[in-house]
Amino acid sequence: MQVRVGSVRGRVVQAVMLAAVLGGCSQSPDPEAKASGSPSASDAAAKSTAAASGGSIGAAGSACQLPVSFDIARHWKAKAVDAEKEMAKTSGGSDGDVTGALADAFLRQGPVTTACEIDAKPAGAIGFLRVWTGKPGDADARTVLRQFVAAEDNVSKEKYRSFTTGGGLAGVEVEYLYTSKLLEETKKESALAVATPAGPVVLHLGGLDTKEHEAMLPAYELAKRTLRVL
């Protein structure tokens, strides 16, 4: 049975978005993470909380061991993902072709695979800051990031720019729009890439919709500002 990975990737992303909605409805946010009251006061409180550091990940012994380290926002929860192991597990079943393609579409994007996901739900938002890693090679950060974005279906209005972290690490970031055909909605997404001796690293921030994405941007900026190679 042949499966078109591009279309599978879109269906996986849409399914994950729907699952995130259900998960957000079934789990109450951390009471300290969002203030009650008017929407503007709640959004301001969420942004303030997201900008505060909740510790760092990346080093040995942290929630995710990576080629880089960076601070994660307070209340956000990090979990390591072993992409190769997950793809191997799903490729041996009776429906291995379909399940394996779904796993590949979810865990691999362009030249990188998922290594860590940092969940915003405990902080009162619906979305993830995901870390993707690749193998050492000659590709520079901009090339890797372009390949990463090109592997995601239905994107438009990409805006690339260079940046430098607080520690002097140079990288490239992008803002773009992703359109869900299933939900018939368009939302903002952001990603950045840096090169390391162990291979490229991509950080990607999605979100349920543009409002959730913008509310989580302080967490993304915190990660970018504190990013350093180990």
Image: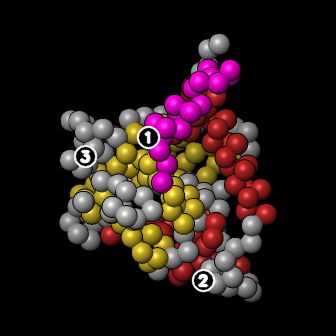
Residues tagged 3 and 1 counted as in contact (Cβ below 8 A): no
**Bounds of the magenta segment:** 80-97
Sequence order check, earlier mark of 2 and 3: 2
Is-magenta flag for residue 90? yes
Q: Label 2 belongs to which residue?
A: 45
Q: Which-is-in-front pick, marks 1 and 2?
A: 1
Residue 45, quarter of picture: bottom right
Q: Amino acid at mark 2?
A: Ala
* Amino acid on which disc 3 is placed: Ala
**Which x, y percent locates residue 173?**
37, 53
Image point (70%, 42%), residue name? 15
Q: How is the model colour-coded?
A: secondary structure
Could you say which disc has been placed on residue 113 in the image?
1
| Residue tagged 3 | 198
Return the mark for residue 78: none
Point 75% across, 67% down: residue: 27
- Magenta run includes residue 26: no
* Tag 2 and tag 3, C-beta contact below 8 Å: no
Q: Please say whether residue 7 is visible from this viewpoint.
A: no
Distance between the Cα atoms at labels 2 and 3?
A: 38 Å
Q: Secondary structure at mark 1?
A: strand
